[in-house]
Image (cartoon, rainbow, N blue to C red):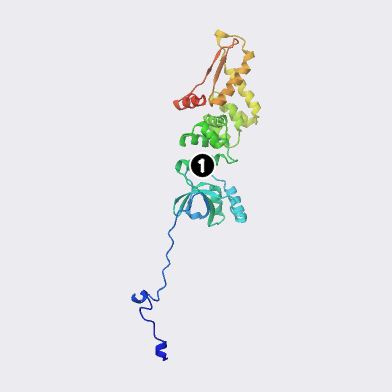
Amino acid sequence: MSDNSAKKKPSGLGRGLNALITGSYDRKPETVSPTPTLTAVNTIADISLTQIETNPFQPRTHFDQVALEELAESIRIQGIIQPITVRQLSADAYQLISGERRYQAAKLAGLDTIPAYIRKANDQQMLEMALIENIQRENLNAIEIALSYQRLLSECDLKQEELGERVGKKRTTVTNYLRLLKLPPDIQIGIRDNLISMGHARAIINIDDVEKQLEVYRKIVNEELSVRKVEELVRNINLQNKKPDPQTKLDLHPLENEVKRVESRLSSYFGTRIHVKASPEGKGEIKIPFVSVDELNRILEILNYA
């Protein structure tokens, strides 16, 4: 066989359709990028940190930088132990539901991706989950918890009983936290900054006069009073402020302490200052004040009236 026949190229038909298209025979096939797809919900996946946006409903706006650096160092050594939780906004965009400290620390640690649990949630569910996760943190102060409870009631349209079920607390516990928000701002700041405890605050709130409340607060801070000492101080203040009724100027001392105990228990239960009057004959009255229709509805709800 001649050299010419050996070098003969295959016919156009044998070369297929590429031979009919000028220059296409030697062209390399183009690489087509796959179209991004939605990740299945209720799954855990490694997600790029650049694809995750923070939660606009996050109730905490300040994160301790030193603690973040310590967490970042732990992540560099051990990685992410507990996945964050996100919702998927589009094929390549996610929004943080919970775990912002881990997310921020992962960025500090130089990670490119982070394990995340993907779930479905609307805006209200986002707020509710962020607040509840926030409440369950051990290092929250009483005012942060109270504000989170208040937001759950007002923004998530929950009743106190429903709220208690969501956070695993009794309704009276929720009420006690909410009562703290009725205290003057200076005292709320003192609670937030751990200058006084919630026990101190619960005693102070039983004083009607704001100036007296502030006076007792300053005394606690300056003299480092115990909760028991403050409770005794508050009882004495309330006894001094109680004016005797001239028409029934009888010896009420046998009932005085019991009435005070009843007032204190009712005030804690209803989340407002309750007034109890009683005579030696066993007659009297209970007054439950309210300052708005919303507060009246809240009291009626506690009474199972609404």
Task: Name which quarter of the figure residue 123 lies in.
Answer: top left
Q: Is residue 217 above or below residue 2?
A: above
31 left or right of 281 in image: left
Residue 182: x percent and y percent? 52, 29
**Residue visible at 49% across and 36% down?**
152
Residue 299: x percent and y percent? 50, 25
Toward the viewer: 255 or 152? 152
Circle 1 sits on which residue? 129
Whether residue 59 is visible here, answered yes or no, is: no
Q: Quadrant of the N terminus?
A: bottom left
Residue 245: x percent and y percent? 55, 11
- Which type of secondary structure does the marked residue at label 1 adopt? helix
Q: Is residue 137 above or below residue 203?
A: below
**Residue visible at 46% across and 40% down?**
124
Toward the viewer: 135 or 211? 135
**Residue visible at 63% across and 26% down?**
230
Q: Looking at the picture, which amino acid does disc 1 mark?
A: Met
**Residue visible at 54% across and 17% down?**
286
Residue 159: x percent and y percent? 49, 32
Q: Is residue 98 above or below residue 171?
A: below
Whether residue 203 is visible here, answered yes or no, is: yes
